[in-house]
Amino acid sequence: MAAFTLAHLSDPHLPPLPTPRLRELMGKRALGYLNWTRNRHRYQRRDVLDALVSDMHGQSPDHVAITGDFVNLALETEFEPARAWLEGVGPPDRISIVPGNHDAYVRATRHRFAEKLGDYFGGDDASGNTFPSLRRRGPLALIGVSSAVPTPPLMATGWLGRSQLRALERLLSEISTEQLFRVLLIHHPLRSDARAKRLTDSGELCALLKQHGVDLVLHGHDHVHSTMWIDGPDRAIPAIGVPSASALAHGRYPAAAYNLFSIEREGNGWRCQQSVRGIGDDLVVRQLNTTRLI
Ligand SMILES: [Fe+2]
Ligand SMILES: [Fe+2]
């Protein structure tokens, strides 16, 4: 059987940012808007995102995972364009998403993500659009969790919570007897040096993964290329992060890129190869490197 190809991109922060209404700029959004108008609009670019997605379409992946931060300030007017963009990437059965902290930026609109984009993460069963979600595609079990919670200004932490962790544990134990390549999708990285940006209950999640295992973790949030290894029950689990899908290189942040994972059965286990494709200043996307992860 041919290898299954999973593309992963993250943090599109869909540009351009619509002009907020004055009343929307109360509180946390005021700082975020200032940051956008002063800095972010220069390096979060729609032409970059379009070039990256066009290259990804050319690679014809079997499925696409997108790990959050679709919007910027979670304004009411940001969710329709996010939906339209996602439909351009592909239909809900070919794309699996989880929310990022910017998709739940403030309490007032924290439910819009599920309302507008729920069919892009809804699970295979009829249990509704909730997390954790489970989608079976080819040999894959795509398991989505939501770490997106509104936070105080200048904070970008994530949190899963005990009930979601318990449900995740049940889900992992239910599928443990099936021959599936389990991919966990989460916005926040499982380890972070930055207190203001970390997943606050990552210790609980890592303990759960050490006991039940998954085969691959995909995340965003840090906007950099990243490979971490997390303890699993019998071997280390690769956890891979990607730069923002709309970014020009700036400061310590690399230009937009996405990963292609080629996954196939090998003997009693799996073979998983990662190819990185990134954009240059000329907006041309090139293959950067290929690594065998498993
Ligand atoms: Fe982000
Ligand atoms: Fe984020």
Image (cartoon, rainbow, N blue to C red):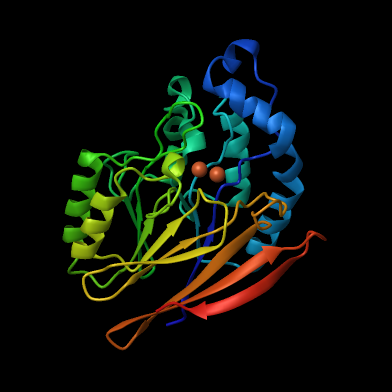
Q: What is the x, y in percent for residue 173?
A: 17, 60
Q: Quadrant of residue 258?
A: bottom right
Look at the image and tell me whether residue 115 can be seen.
Answer: yes
Q: Is residue 38 above or below residue 205?
A: above
Q: What is the x, y in percent for residue 123?
A: 33, 48
Q: Quadrant of residue 54?
A: bottom right
Q: Which residue is outermost to the right?
A: 282
Q: Is residue 129 above or below residue 245?
A: above
> In this image, 53 relative to 190: left or right?
right
Q: How many marks?
A: 0
Q: Which residue is outermost to the bottom?
A: 267
Measuring 65% from the left and 73% from the top, which residue is drawn there?
288
Q: What is the x, y in percent for residue 61?
A: 55, 66
> In this image, 293 relative to 225: left or right?
left
> In this image, 281 relative to 97: left or right?
right
Q: Which residue is outermost to the top?
A: 23
Quadrant containing the N terminus in the rendered view: bottom left
Q: What is the x, y in percent for residue 161?
A: 26, 39
Q: Quadrant of residue 175?
A: bottom left
Between 156 and 131, the residue placed more toward the observer is 156
Measuring 21% from the left and 39% from the top, which residue is drawn there?
163
Measuring 44% from the left and 59% from the top, which residue is drawn there?
218
Q: Is residue 214 above or below residue 192?
A: below
> In this image, 58 relative to 6: left or right?
right
Quadrant containing the C terminus in the rendered view: bottom left
Look at the image and tell me whether residue 99 can be seen.
Answer: no
